[in-house]
Amino acid sequence: MGGWMRIEMKRALFKHNYERPGLSQRELAAWAKVQFKLKKAPA
């Protein structure tokens, strides 16, 4: 994909986080990297 997250991706990330409140930031970033095919995990 690329390096930047589009607004749709950010909304999906927020939804995923809301549905799984126990995830750490690191786990959430790893999920986003795989899910959205990012070059690196978001900070």
Image (cartoon, rainbow, N blue to C red):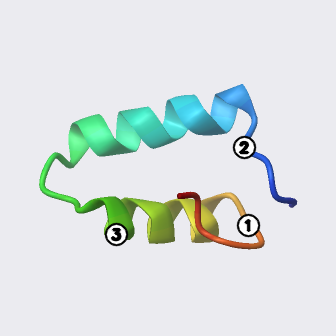
Q: Secondary structure at mark 2?
A: loop
From the image, tell me which residue sits under label 2: 5
Q: Going by the image, does 1 lie left or right of 11? A: right
Q: Using the image, tell me which numbered label, if any, was put on residue 22.
A: none
What separation in Å lies between label 3 and label 1 (alpha carbons)? 15 Å
From the image, tell me which residue sits under label 3: 27
Residue 8 position in % (x across, y down): 67, 29
For the point 26% across and 35% down, the residue is 18
From the image, tell me which residue sits under label 1: 37
Q: Earlier in the sequence, mark 2 or mark 1?
A: 2
Residue 1 position in % (x across, y down): 86, 60
Q: Going by the image, does 21 lie left or right of 14? A: left
- Compare residues 39 and 34 and report the one nearer the observer: 39
Q: Secondary structure at mark 3?
A: helix
Residue 37 position in % (x across, y down): 73, 67
- Compare residues 3 and 20 and report the one nearer the observer: 3
Q: Which of the 4 quarters of the picture holds residue 22?
A: bottom left
